[in-house]
Amino acid sequence: MATTPKIEDISRILKHHLPVEYGAVLFGSRASGRARPGSDWDIGVLGPTPLGGEVVQTILDELDELPTLHSFDVVDLTTVPEYFRETAVRGAKKILPSVALDTFAKEMIMPANTQVDLTAFESALARLGEALAEAETELIRDAAIQRFEFTFELAWKTTMRVEQASGLESGASPRQVIKVAFKADWIDDNELWLTMLNDRNRTSHAYNRIVAEEIFDRLPEYRDALSGLLARLKRELEPPEKKNGDAFVED
């Protein structure tokens, strides 16, 4: 069994690298108590201005050196859309205090919603569509790739919760969740989803123009596939009587 990371070790690393005006929270399944043994540790940092990718990467590198097989994900909540930030801090556990986090004090003491909410995924998908509707420029391309990154994160984590709510043996990583969704016939294009997963992992290298252009060119396909997944999740969450409503028609 993998050794569980200690909050004090995480706090020590964050305190060493974050400016004094920055705070940090533990959010997601680890904060809500719904985590599986292999679930990621989602850490959100928040301050008055964007932190910068180099600092985030340095924190990740040190977290990965901890004596554990658990994986970490560090998100600068200053840079994400408001709906994502509000969802993340709801029910989050404070690791490092800050004035910026005090703004969300009310949300943090509220319990995380135990029902599966598709709103954040749907909103992110709509924003991705808006970016793709714009004429392509380098700025629009970068914005669209970032929105794809957020949308994909929300997509697989929302899908994981629907799988769990449906009694399926969901995994704790994007690849595992996608495999379960494929087996359940919620998605049907194996190659497209594997390519999408690979491109999501490549977004950290989107500063490379060739990589960015390759990913951007595939975004319309990804948007359509994600839209199909969203529709399937909505269907899965319908009450049984509504799902089967068309199956029985009285004369």
Image (cartoon, rainbow, N blue to C red):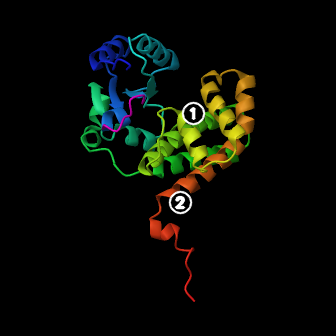
Please name the amino acid that badge 1 sits on.
Arg
| Residue 134: x %, y % from top left | 69, 45
Q: Is residue 13 above or below residue 137?
A: above
Dominant secondary structure (helix, strand or loop) of the stretch shown in magenta: loop
| Residue at far bottom of view | 251
Query: Label 2: how many residues lie within 10 Å, few (<14), some (14-19) or many (20+)?
Result: some
Q: Residues within 10 Å of mark 1 (few under 14, many from 20)?
A: some
**Location of mark 2 (residue):** 235
Q: Which residues are magenta?
A: 33-39
Displayed quadrant of residue 248: bottom right
Element type where label 2 sits in the image: helix
Q: Say if residue 194 shows up in the picture.
A: yes
Which residue is found at the position 69% from the left and 40% from the top? Answer: 190
Query: Looking at this view, is 179 or 131 the one in front?
Result: 179
Please tell me which residue lies in front, 159 or 24.
159
Out of 18 and 158, give the one closest to the viewer. Answer: 158
| 123 sits left or right of 25 in the view | right
Q: Amino acid at mark 2?
A: Arg
Q: Residue at x 43, y 46 (%)?
A: 164
Residue at x-position 33% and y-position 25%: 24
> Along the horizontal axis of the image, is 135 left or right of 28?
right
Answer with mark 1 or mark 2, whichever residue precedes in sequence: 1
Q: Tell me the residue that label 1 is attached to.
A: 175
CB-based contact (under 8 Å), mark 1 and mark 2: no
Above or below, comparing residue 63 to residue 133 in the picture? above
Q: Find residue 127 and report its horizontal and vertical position in percent.
A: 58, 46
Q: Secondary structure at mark 1?
A: helix
Query: How far apart are the two marked residues, 1 and 2, measured between alpha carbons?
Result: 22 Å
The reply to whether residue 151 is visible in this rendering is: no
Check residue 126 for magenta coloring.
no
Q: Please tell me whether residue 34 belongs to the stretch shown in magenta.
A: yes
Is residue 40 placed above or below 9 in the rendered structure?
A: below
